[in-house]
Image: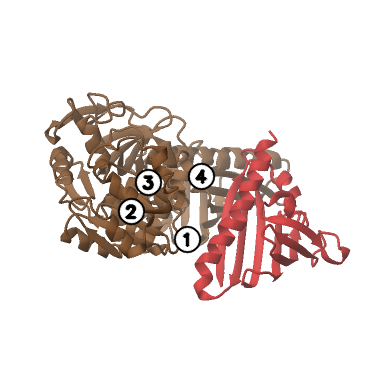
Chain colours: A brown, B red
Amino acid sequence: MALQKVVRSTVIDAPIERVWAVLRDFNSHDQWHEVVAKSDIEDGKNSDRVGCVRNFTLQDGNHIREMLLSLSDKDFVSTYTIVDATVPLQRYVATITLKPVTDGQRTFWHWASSFATPPGMEAELRHMVAHGVYEAGFSNLRRHLQLGVHTSSVARTTSNRSSSQATSIPAQSIKLREYGEATQLRAETTDVAPPGPGEVRIRQTAVGVNYLDVYLRKGWIPELLPLPGTPGMEAAGEVIDVGPDVTSLLPGDRVAYMGPVPGSYASVRNVPAAWTVRLGAGIDDITAAASLLKGITADYLLRDLGRIQAGTRLLVHAAAGGVGTLVCAWARSMGALVMGTVSSQAKARIARDHGCQHVIVTSNYEFSAAVHSIAQGADVIIDGLGDAACEENFAALAPCGHWISLGQASGPLKPLSPDWLVTKSVSFSRPVAFAYVATHAVLNQRAERVWQAFQQGILLPVQAEQFALKDAAAAHTRLESRQSSGSLVLLPS
Amino acid sequence: MIQVYTSSVIDASADAVWAKIRDFNGLPQWHPAIADSRIENNQPADRVGCIRYFHLQDGGLIRERLLALSDYDFTCTYSILESPMGVDNYVATIKLTPITDGGRCFAEWSAEFDCAPHREAELSQSIGQGVFQSGFDSLKRQFSSRR
């Protein structure tokens, strides 16, 4: 008699490690597969011992005993056979195979079996296995993963909880009610509603502090932060739950995000899933929160705008700062000639440690003569100084150079005359980071390059200064003192 | 021995995607990096052992031998005989698997090869992303635009 064969397959929107953590447990089905009422491993064996036997009681009262024939953590394969059963499946051998979908952190799941049946029951039993067991299992496991259960071992007592915490969660956030000094940043308690469509709710573990936050607090860009408002453009943490239509993330995933709408100074926040990037084990939350926006800024500055190549003469202002150190180290690895300005000898040391070859210490925005004596001018200038250094920047540029205005610490630049720029045939750019992560794919690519640069040692580990979230005012005061390293994070308690 | 593995989900049936992939002489029709292709000695393109002779868009010449072709398993295995890539013992397999809960398929493209140690990372990246992923991306585009 010919063996019956059943094959079913699907794609699960979760990384393979997540799916495998459930499926490799030969004793897990009563937690996620709704046809299985009860599962036990006989003789008290562990469920990953090849040869162990599980004893299923199904919801309909049937019993099935199955033996684990093979288990591979290398190939993500589990093979098992029915030893005896009250359903008439004979010589039943099944194999579960998982494979990673490498272009999207998803998992391909293949479930195949062959078996014999009593005459006349072939179609009925094929249907039962294909639909009642395999396809039902696909949808049951999807729902199980959305419960936020990481591994089956912790699920025993919690498998009945609702699929999302459909209630508001109390959270601490920093509220700005008037523009002005750092003391305007005050902690308040709020409730964070469940995530809306396309959103994820994140329990934040580290929040990045950027100079942009200071500009927002001072009211320089009121259209970006209307009052009352919460500043902050980036953070890292763990997904609590996901809203409708979110398929790329699950509760428990570690993520970081940067977004064009402020509000990250909080312990819990809803953000669009499209803002987020998943964090691998090699990047800790503080590094991610302190470096996502700054790292992506360095990435587009050097690759897209500066087009840095071997020999490019690069001048970086605030070379010891948060963005400056990343830019120096990364540009150096690309073979650029890296010059930087700093305001003190202590900062000169930091800049040198990060690959800045020629450090110019200046407290009065004079540097063009030094740049010309080092390199006869700069092909690319990354300028966070603004108005007070306007003439010096122009003087420092080599012909056909590129002046990239990233910030304006000394005050807003006055309009530049095209007739002035033409005298050296120079380009002027005024970029904003969020325009360079317009799609989720591009965001992921850039973030991946940043994390790799950290892991390869091209970028040095971030020594972020840490403040409690409620002390956001102190963090701003520190950042504005110009004494800080430029990397500051707030830690929600 | 270096191993490269790239996989993806293509929004078309395995049959439809296989119709493109099984043509060992058909790379220029779907892979953006390939400029032209012919089969040596006027052999049919599904004859196991035949050799395809093709140029990359940048002008590089590659010759590859068809080692295995299965219309049953949707797999195609080939080796590189001659290329500017600097790889030895290069054997690659492209495989499709139907995804039964939708008209999609799971596509895998893997290779094993030897190379100079300092070029491992670069070649893994250029083969895994530049060749395999860009081929998948192109197939995804072709099948999405047909809807």
Q: Residues under labels 1 and 4: Cα distance?
A: 28 Å
Q: Nearer the viewer, residue A120 or A223?
A: A223
Report if residue A126 is visible in the image: no
**Badge 1: residue crowd in 10 Å (few <14, some 14–19, many ≥20):** few
> Where is mark 4, residue-wise?
A63
Residue ID at (14%, 31%): A184
Mark 1 or mark 2, earlier in chain: 1
Question: x%, y% of residue A395?
Answer: 33, 51
Mark 3 or mark 4, earlier in chain: 4
In contact (CB < 8 Å): disc 1 and disc 3: no
Q: Which mark is residue A396?
A: 2
Question: x%, y% of residue A472?
Answer: 16, 39
Mark 2 or mark 3, earlier in chain: 2
> Where is mark 1, residue-wise?
A73
Give the left or right position of residue A41, taking residue A481 as reference.
right
**Badge 1: chain ID:** A
The local secondary structure at tag 4 comes to strand
Q: Which mark is residue A93?
A: none
> Where is mark 3, residue-wise?
A404
Disc number lying in front (1 or 3)? 3
Tag 2: amino acid: Ala
Tag 4: amino acid: His
Residue A367, quarter of picture = bottom left
